[in-house]
Image (cartoon, rainbow, N blue to C red):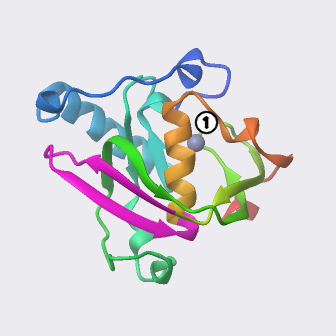
Amino acid sequence: MIEIVQNGHKVLREKAKPVLIQKIKTEEIQKIISDMKKALASQSDGVAIAAPQIAVPLRIFVVSGKIFNENFMHDKINNIKNIKEDLIFINPEFKKISKDKKTMTEGCLSVRPLYGKVRRASRATVTAYDENAKKFELGGSGLLAQIFQHEIDHLDGVLFIDKAKDVHEINDEDAK
Ligand code: ZN
């Protein structure tokens, strides 16, 4: 079992370092990606995870394939349908981010058991490298745009509780 570090661990407050593109295919980076996928899969309510959450200060995040499932808000995601594989984002950067914002309920695998309301841009497009070192671009609205912002915050040492209002505890059942 891969440990997901909790708020209070200093790695969550570090600015994560970029991955050297020529190192993406190395065993070292592939193992980190695999550990991140395992850690994410171990959390039934998890939709994404950033490398600092498994104590690795590198600019990588993984979005669970389950959010691209037809039954999980696929209508809110541009360009892409029915992808069920986890998506890997290495050295992600915002290419576009909407001025239009929405207040969204948010939690974090590293800030259990708190939830709160965060103002997030309602649409965002990021560029990143995938696990094969290929550059790609992906845009989304709603949940996917929220995930992009939450995960890139992690890479900059920011947690949602720094920005959230109405922070409160919620039990697992309510969280789903
Ligand atoms: Zn988080």
Displayed quadrant of residue 20? top left
Q: Is residue 69 above or below residue 58?
A: below
Question: Could you tell me which residue is drawn at 35 percent across and 62 percent down?
Answer: 138
Boundaries of the magenta span = 124-143
User: Which is nearer the eye, 83 or 100?
Assistant: 100
Main SS, magenta region, reads: strand
Pointer 1: what residue?
Answer: 110
x then y, percent, for residue 145: 52, 61
Check disc 1 and give the amino acid type. Ser
Q: Is residue 99 left or right of residue 117?
A: left
Q: Is residue 121 left or right of residue 144?
A: right
Image quadrant occupied by the N terminus: top left
Question: Could you tell me which residue is drawn at 47 percent across and 51 percent down?
Answer: 48
Q: Residue 46: in sight, yes or no?
A: no
Q: Is residue 96 above or below residue 20?
A: below
User: Which is nearer the eye, 50 or 100?
Assistant: 100
x then y, percent, for residue 93: 39, 44
Q: Label 1, secondary structure: give it.
A: loop
Q: Does residue 138 show up magenta in the picture?
A: yes
Q: Residue 154: in sight, yes or no?
A: yes
> Is ligand 1 less than 8 Å from the beta carbon at label 1?
yes
x then y, percent, for residue 62: 38, 48
